[in-house]
Image (cartoon, rainbow, N blue to C red):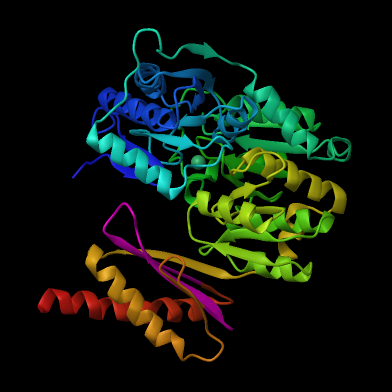
Amino acid sequence: MDRLIVSVSGVRGTIGGTLSPQAACEFGCAFATMLRSGGDRPLTIAMGRDTRPSGPMLAHALKAGLTAGGVSVVDLGVVSTPGVALMTSKLKAAGGIVITASHNPAEYNGIKFLQPTGTGLTAADAGRLRDIWESRRFALAGPDELGGESSELRTHGLHVDAVCAATDVTAVAAQRFKVVVDSINGAGCVVTPMLLGRLGCEVAQINGEPTGRFAHAPEPIEGNLGQLCQAVRKHRAGVGFAQDPDADRLVIVDEAGRFIGEEYTLALATAFVLSHRKGKVATNLATSRMIDDVAAAAGCEVVRAPTGEANVAEAMSREGCIFGGEGNGGVIDPRVVPVRDSLVGMAMVLQYMAETGKPLSELVRQIPAYVMIKTKRPCPAEAVAPIVARAREASAGRPGAKLDDADGLRVDLPEGWVSVRGSNTEPIIRIMGEAKDRAAVEELIGQVNAIADEVIGKRNTG
Ligand code: MG
């Protein structure tokens, strides 16, 4: 059934379906009610959107709800998700809103709510927002207390400034790198060439019109990036960059036009960061062991957080990490903005290439390689806990096993790791693992699948 998905990460739904203007307006009222529950002082939030054609409609509806609830809105227009996060913090706003469905197909859109720091809401605040929305108990303002509206168009420039302030611009620019960028006609279309221009690159852009008409399926995975790989070869570029529609994730194509895998974005960026500064790095439990190898080689520690960007950001601030991110192509440099930022990733990879003088394929080869397999299967919500419990029992006695149950279960073994967790939004479980070779990871995943077969089978027959 098509339902509005309301989770810790925000709201997702279909246009012409569940994500109606009414729903957006109600969420605007709910967010204003939540923000103003702390007192009566006037509040402002920063709001931006990706290029989806439904963005303006949702922006109008959200503004109606927010201003009716007494909150003023600074409209940033079409900007990236890290751009909204940056401006939320720079404008000292009480919160932020990004209108995006990230890598979901074009029929979707979504609303993501940010804390004043720019990171996503905590689970507790996301729960409060949902409760207010479900109860429809909105605290609406009187005629003299309505919020106002203004627009702010400096986001791209300030974002580029912030990334450049953390980059050795002179070293990168001296190389005159040739770069191909696929911004998928999304929020990265304008700001990305601005950054790469400042970094002295010669830029060939594909899918660079901010129309929101996605030229290929928007998830930046190998099957969707054939056009970029080809363009890198055609232009004889040193590197190809692909963004998702809200430009927080980055995946990389090497100088031979080969997709190197989204897990390498964080691994390469971590290797670069730790070659300059030593400190803890954070990632989630679903990210490749490459980051552990890179950190160990630099004598640094990896902090693992449950899946979800806000969890990684929280772990970074709690543990004082100098860097972090997710294996899906999301890198977080807290000096720029405490959320995933594809621009930060590009600047780091280019500076890494500039400083080492090595082509990307060689930098990739320096990192120990693994085979990672990600699977999902239908599973009734009630069966998730018994499957996790059985997998825990089965793993506890294995030699060298390290168990982490912050998010489902992850079992680290000398030969690799396997994890199993339920989804927040769909009746499925995700089983994934990684090892040095395919047979080893298939065996690890097979063991968990056998447990799932048994638990689900028993429920069906009993
Ligand atoms: Mg995204």
In the foreground, 314 or 111: 314
In the foreground, 255 or 122: 122
Looking at the image, residue 311 lies above or below residue 186: below
Quadrant where the image shows the C terminus:
bottom left
Magenta span dominant secondary structure: strand
Looking at the image, residue 26 lies above or below residue 11: above
In the foreground, 234 or 82: 82
Q: Position of residue 352 (x, y in %)?
A: 80, 50
Tell me which segment is drawn in magenta: 412-433
Q: Position of residue 166 (x, y in %)?
A: 78, 40
**Horizontal side, residue 138 vs residue 125: left or right:** left
Q: Tally the marks.
A: 0
Q: Position of residue 253 (x, y in %)?
A: 64, 48
Looking at the image, residue 360 lies above or below residue 89: below
Quadrant where the image shows the N terminus:
top left
Q: Position of residue 225 (x, y in %)?
A: 53, 45
Which residue appears farthest toward the top when viewing the image? 144
In magenta stretch: residue 416: yes
Q: Quadrant of residue 168?
A: top right
Looking at the image, residue 413 lies above or below residue 63: below
> Residue at left 51%, top 49%?
310
- Do we see residue 262 in this rendering? no
In magenta stretch: residue 223: no
Which residue appears farthest toward the left when viewing the image? 462
- Do we see residue 177 in this rendering? yes
> Residue at left 33%, top 33%?
107
> Residue at left 41%, top 48%?
124
Q: Quadrant of residue 161?
A: top right
